[in-house]
């Protein structure tokens, strides 16, 4: 199943699939986000796995980010890892301003090879996590695409994504925002 197929439900006019650089499977069985990877994340996750910052949110962030990446060329590996780590070190589901910094630190503490990333990609992933709550600009497009992927899922908590707080032109597209909102409201995640 590809984005070009699934987007026809209610929002089939969003994109011409022929203009997208690549298609991504919607299956969560990513080459990077394996069952064992998720098991390890889950074992140390302190909060409700099915809560507002849990697995369904992470999967929508992944989908949001991969869709944006198909439009702007952001690094999909960084996006996938960001999706499943950026909130993984939260201590509560409310005000927790250091959770991004803790995620960045946790990533750096994992054994070599845990993340299938180059050193440069690792640094970008850690930057993306560390600054994701309030970051407004970053020289790297993949980092900003990670932030947008997260912010596009704000409607799950009743906050409409505001283009002013989105960093990339792909995410500011009104049709992309509406697509993301519909998925946030549905609460659906694939395969979990
Ligand atoms: Fe998040």
Image: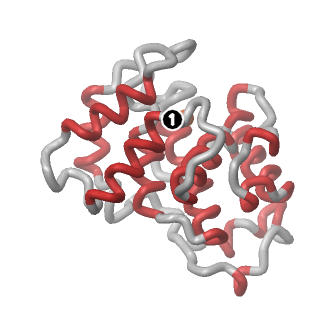
The residue tagged 1 is 131
- Is residue 110 shown to the viewer in this render? yes
- Is residue 60 shown to the viewer in this render? no
Residue 110, horizontal then vertical, whole percent: 19, 41
Residue located 81% across and 45% down the image: 163
Q: Residue furthest bottom?
A: 18
Where does ligand 1 appear, by image quarter? top right
User: Dot 1: few (<14), some (14–19), or many (≥20) neighbours within 10 Å?
Assistant: many
159 left or right of 54 in image: right
Return the residue nearer the eye: 44 or 137.
137
Q: Residue furthest front?
A: 139
Badge 1 element = loop
Residue located 35% across and 35% down the image: 104
Residue 122, horizontal then vertical, whole percent: 32, 52
The answer to which quarter of the image holds residue 168 is bottom right
Image quadrant holding the N terminus, namely bottom right
Seen in the picture, residue 36 relative to 26 is either above or below; the reply is above
Seen in the picture, residue 105 relative to 184 is either above or below; the reply is above
Return the residue nearer the eye: 157 or 125.
125
Seen in the picture, residue 36 relative to 43 is either above or below; the reply is below
Seen in the picture, residue 75 relative to 104 is either above or below; the reply is below
Residue 126, horizontal then vertical, whole percent: 38, 43
The answer to whether the beta carbon of the residue marked 1 is less than 8 Å from any atom of ligand 1 is no
Residue 55, horizontal then vertical, whole percent: 47, 37
Q: Residue furthest left?
A: 111
6 left or right of 113 in image: right
Residue located 86% across and 55% down the image: 174
Residue located 29% across and 55% down the image: 34
Image quadrant holding the C terminus, namely top left
């Amino acid at each position: 199943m590809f984005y070009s197929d699934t987007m026809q439900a209610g929002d089939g006019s969003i994109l011409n699939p022929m203009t997208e650089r690549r298609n991504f499977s919607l299956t969560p069985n990513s080459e990077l986000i394996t069952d064992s990877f998720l098991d390890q994340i889950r074992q140390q996750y302190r909060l409700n796995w099915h809560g507002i910052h849990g697995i369904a949110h992470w999967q929508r962030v992944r989908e949001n980010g991969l869709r944006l990446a198909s439009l702007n060329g952001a690094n999909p590996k960084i996006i996938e890892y960001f999706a499943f780590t950026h909130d993984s070190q939260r201590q509560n589901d409310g005000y927790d301003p250091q959770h991004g910094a803790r995620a960045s630190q946790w990533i750096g503490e994992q054994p070599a090879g845990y993340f299938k990333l180059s050193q440069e990609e690792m640094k970008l992933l850690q930057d993306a996590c560390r600054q994701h709550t309030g970051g407004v600009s970053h020289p790297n497009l993949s980092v900003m695409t990670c932030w947008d992927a997260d912010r596009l899922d704000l409607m799950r908590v009743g906050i409409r994504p505001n283009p002013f707080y989105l960093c990339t032109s792909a995410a500011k597209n009104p049709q992309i925002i509406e697509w993301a909102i519909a998925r946030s409201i549905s609460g659906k995640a694939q395969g979990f």
